[in-house]
Image (cartoon, rainbow, N blue to C red):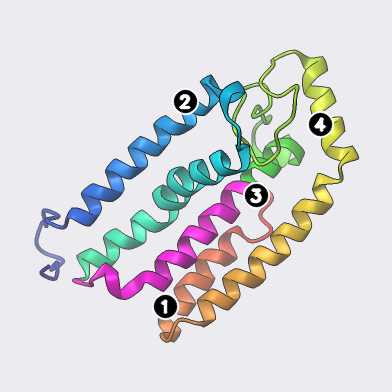
Amino acid sequence: MRRCEPSNVMWVEDSNIISLTLSISIRKMVQFSAAVNMAHILDLNEMHRRIVQYKTAYYSFYLPVACALLMAGENLDNHTLVKDVLIEMGTYFQVQDDYLDCFGDPEVIGKIGTDIEDFKCSWVFQENYGKADPTCVAKVKELYKDLNLQGVFAEYEAKSYEKLISLIEAHPSKAVQAVLKSFLGKIYKRQK
């Protein structure tokens, strides 16, 4: 792989980008299929993990950094720790997004969450999920409160943050650590 000079237009010749793009596209189809076939899925946790990993983590976190590394002439095989951190960060981000969809203040997050009505394979999933009936939505949100999912999320968030900081600090480059900590700082304890 040759280094991309700022004045040149670079055609990405690396199969990694093509592979990542194909993987993301296929995984987005998995999410759609999950909504259609939810009743037939035996392991919702595994389905959610796959959707989060390939839809959010790769697409929103790893792919942009992988592209930048490739354009800088880097070999992605030399940055597996960066990939691991970004996949974990993307997972944390999506679980956080699922949480905010249910519990976030619409005035703050800028929308009224509809994951329950839209039957999305969310971090929080129950029997009345996927029904637009306001009574079902209210039951699911009440159940979430009864189950203290806000407390469960707070614990998950703290553990995820600790894990991410530990992974980031394991990277030998202080510059890479700074970039990854900057990414984490933008999403940690976000409200929208």
Q: CA distance from mark 2 to mark 4?
A: 24 Å
Badge 2 or badge 1: first in the primary sequence: 2
Whether residue 15 is visible = yes
Question: Is label 2 in a helix, a strand or a loop?
Answer: helix
Label 4 environment density (alpha carbons within 10 Å; few <14, some 14–19, many ≥20): many
Indicate the amino acid at tag 1: Val
Tell me if residue 107 comes above or below residue 71 in the rendering: above
Q: In the orientation shown, which residue stands out farthest toward the top?
A: 133
Question: Could you say where residue 172 lies in the image, as x and y percent from the top left?
Answer: 42, 86
Mark 2, mark 1: which one is toward the viewer? 2
Badge 2 or badge 3: first in the primary sequence: 2
Q: Which sits in the foreground, 61 or 41?
A: 41
Question: Could you say where residue 187 lies in the image, as x and y percent from the top left?
Answer: 59, 58
Q: Which mark is residue 96?
A: 3
**Residue beneath the point at 83% across and 53% down:** 151
Badge 3 or badge 1: first in the primary sequence: 3
**Residue beneath the point at 48% across and 78% down:** 178
**Residue beneath the point at 55% across and 53% down:** 91
Residue 175 located left or right of residue 13: right
Question: Is label 3 in a helix, a strand or a loop?
Answer: helix
Question: Is label 4 in a helix, a strand or a loop?
Answer: helix
Which residue in the protein does label 1 denote? 176
Which residue in the protein does label 4 denote? 141
Badge 1 or badge 4: first in the primary sequence: 4
Question: Is label 1 in a helix, a strand or a loop?
Answer: helix
Label 3 environment density (alpha carbons within 10 Å; few <14, some 14–19, many ≥20): many
Indicate the amino acid at tag 3: Gln
The residue segment tinted magenta is 73-95
